[in-house]
Amino acid sequence: MKVMEHLYVYLWDDPRENNCNSIFIDGKTPVLIDPGHLDKVNLLFDRMKDDGVEPERIKAVICTHAHPDHFEGTLAFKDSAVRIGISKREEQFIEEEARPMYAQHGIAMPDYRVDFYLKEGELHLGRHELQVLETPGHSPGGICLYWPRHGVLISGDLVFSRGVGRVDLPGGDGAALKSSLNRLAGLRVELLIPGHGPAIPGAERVRGNFDFVKAAYLTL
Ligand SMILES: [Zn+2]
């Protein structure tokens, strides 16, 4: 669904359709953020086409973190010129934590590809100026994307509507999640787009959500 000029948000509430929310930012460098599960990418493409966006236009794919429900869909772009980006720490996490886990279960690690690394600081997508925020906690190399001009925060699995991401998975860190959350709560956010569940529009509602999750989770 197109939520404003250049910004399309695909929220899923039926896990049979897809799992994580996907975001498409149009412009000179059209970018897809968190493509979801590999076998669900076609359903995402269908929704994009319904909005008049041809998926062939995607030039880059960015993942907030490497959990399969966000990252696996990058495999759909494996044999294309689409450039795939994730943080370096998160790639290290795949190699150190995920690869042995796959091996333990006798499953071949998917043959993924990373073309560029996201790191703390500015990220220019065509004429759009975004910021990469390194926000460990749910995953060691997890990032959020902040678009200051529009007050848009793409928070991956760090913070949701009335919840925060799990910290009990490999690489999860409760203390890191708290400081990442405090950092995000200091931003001017007009639209919060989490990795799962509903988006939160409006600065006041976003503020209320940060207050709620901080009271519920930071005092534990
Ligand atoms: Zn996750």
Image (cartoon, helix red, strand yellow):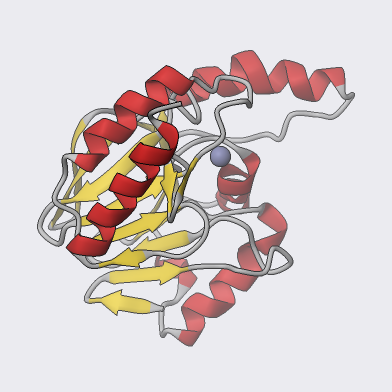
Looking at the image, in which quadrant does ligand 1 appear? Answer: top right
Whether residue 8 is situated above or below residue 103 in the rendered picture: below
* Foreground of the two, 11 or 217: 217
Q: With 112 as the anchor, is 84 left or right in this view?
A: left
Q: Position of residue 121 (x, y in %)?
A: 18, 32
Q: With 133 as the anchor, is 53 left or right in this view?
A: right
Q: Position of residue 23 (x, y in %)?
A: 41, 61
Quadrant in the rendering for residue 45: bottom right
The reply to whether residue 95 is visible in this rendering is yes
Quadrant in the rendering for residue 36: bottom right
Q: Residue at x 31, y 24 (%)?
A: 179
Q: Residue at x 41, y 18 (%)?
A: 175
Q: Quadrant of the N terminus?
A: bottom left
Q: Residue at x 56, y 19 (%)?
A: 171
Q: With 160 as the anchor, is 80 left or right in this view?
A: right
Q: Position of residue 210 (x, y in %)?
A: 30, 47
* Foreground of the two, 169 or 56: 169
Whether residue 2 is situated above or below residue 138 in the rendered picture: below
Quadrant in the rendering for residue 27: bottom left
* Foreground of the two, 201 or 73: 201
